[in-house]
Image (cartoon, rainbow, N blue to C red):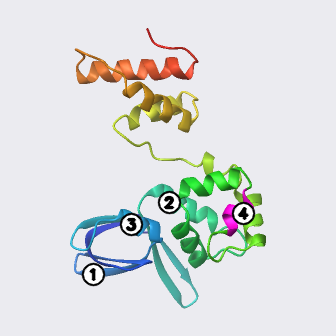
Amino acid sequence: MFNSIRGLITGKSSDTVYILTGGIEWDISVPAKDIEKLPPPGGEGRVYTWLYHKDDQMRLYGFADEAGRTTFLELIKVEGIGPRGGIKIMGNIDREELERALEAEDLVRLEQVPGLGKKTAQKMILSLKGKLTRLPQPASGPYGDLVKALEEMGYDRRQAAAAMEKAAAGAYPGLSGAQKEQAVFREAILSLGGQSGA
């Protein structure tokens, strides 16, 4: 099935993006916050897709990254949240903020999301607390591969990313690109171990 669609963005609305590829224009439902991340009409964009097919209904949903799609697929497993509801929720709250609200059992914040009532918010907490933060997340930034390496060594992803960002901000005069990478990596490990570099 489709994993992603890349092509010319021909139009965007509050919850839909149109992408032209190979002579076919795709009409894809996308969360509002993801639409903001995509290039304007006339630019080339890529969306990670999921096809909903039930009885006589078929609809293509899209996301700016794989992490967004994974979160959406977890959301729609919650009783009372269908694909349209999942898109609406993700269009009104950032994925990271959603994770924080679920971890903190912050019903007040969840109920502020349009269309999300108290009962559904409670079901989300019961079903998803602790789960979204354990889902695979893409490494980002210039040292994304190093963050991933730290995660594979057993370090928490967020702590590893923060340590890498802090280490990368340091001064490494006279080092080549590869040497600087090694120095940043070593400094991040020291930081995660509660030590400071020399």
Question: Is there any visible trace of residue 49 in the rendered image?
Answer: no
Mark 1, secondary structure of its residue: strand
Which residue is painted at 37% across and 62% down in the image?
Answer: 37
Residue kind at label 2, given as amino acid type: Gly
Earlier-in-chain disc, 3 versus 1? 1
**CA distance separating discs 1 and 2:** 25 Å
Earlier-in-chain disc, 1 versus 2? 1
Residue 145 is marked as none
Residue at mark 1: 24
Mark 3, secondary structure of its residue: helix
**CA distance separating discs 3 and 2:** 13 Å
Q: Residues within 10 Å of mark 4 (few under 14, many from 20)?
A: few
Q: Which residues are magenta?
A: 106-111
Q: Which of these two is toward me, 187 or 54?
A: 187
Which residue is painted at 62% across and 75% down in the image?
Answer: 114
Q: Position of residue 75 (x, y in %)?
A: 63, 65
Which residue is painted at 29% across and 18% down in the image?
Answer: 179
